[in-house]
Image (cartoon, rainbow, N blue to C red):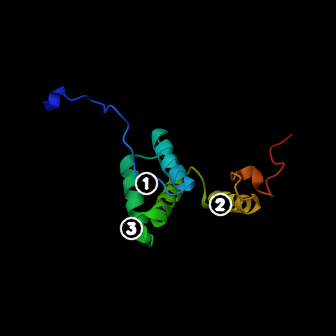
């Protein structure tokens, strides 16, 4: 078959041996970067620069895994504060809320901010 006769899309979806993300939070960090770029919060070149800087400063990031995704979060935090989308205090408060929610969530139950004992009843009439 000549290359120009080959179908543009494969007949079957590719299969992968390992999951793309090791944990849901990594997929969330990826999705957040894509969503913020799509909304014009930063350009891909700005993202590449922030991620490169964060990777250089994060131990273990060069080998992938949690260190790599920790650098993603650091890059997101940096761009979020530099662009004025959220202040460092607001980011710290949100991180603390997620930590409290995780500690208060029974094993096997999805962690949501509603599980934060300090937020229960907030915004409910």
> Looking at this view, is 77 or 9 the one in front?
9
Labelled pair 2, 1 in contact (Cβ < 8 Å): no
Residue 100 position within the rendered picture, expressed as x and y whole percent measured from the top left = 73, 62
Quick one: quadrant of the C terminus? Answer: top right
Label 2: which residue?
A: 95
* Residue at 73 percent of width and 63 percent of height: 103
Vertical arrangement, residue 42 with respect to residue 52, above or below: above
Q: Mark 2 packing: few (<14 Cα in 10 Å), some, or many (20+)?
A: few
* Marks 3 and 1, the one that precedes in the sequence: 1
76 to the left or right of 125: left
Label 1: which residue?
A: 18
Disc 2 to disc 1, C-alpha distance:
29 Å
Q: What is the residue that sits farthest to the right in this orientation?
A: 125
Residue 43 position within the rendered picture, expressed as x and y whole percent measured from the top left = 40, 46
* Marks 2 and 1, the one that precedes in the sequence: 1
Observer-side mark, 3 or 2, equals 3
Q: What is the residue that sits farthest to the top in this orientation?
A: 5
SS assignment at label 3 = helix
Label 3: which residue?
A: 63
Disc 3 to disc 2, C-alpha distance:
25 Å
């Amino acid at each position: 078959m000549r290359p120009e006769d080959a179908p543009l899309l494969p007949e079957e979806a590719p299969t992968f041996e390992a999951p793309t993300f090791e944990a849901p939070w990594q997929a969330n960090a990826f999705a957040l970067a894509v969503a913020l770029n799509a909304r014009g919060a930063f350009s891909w070149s700005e993202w590449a620069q922030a991620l490169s800087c964060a990777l250089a400063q994060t131990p273990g990031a060069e080998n992938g895994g949690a260190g790599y995704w920790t650098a993603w979060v650091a890059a997101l935090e940096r761009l979020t504060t530099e662009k004025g989308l959220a202040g460092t205090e607001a980011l710290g408060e949100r991180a603390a809320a997620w930590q409290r929610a995780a500690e208060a969530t029974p094993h096997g139950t999805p962690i949501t901010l509603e599980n934060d004992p300090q937020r229960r009843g907030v915004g409910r009439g």
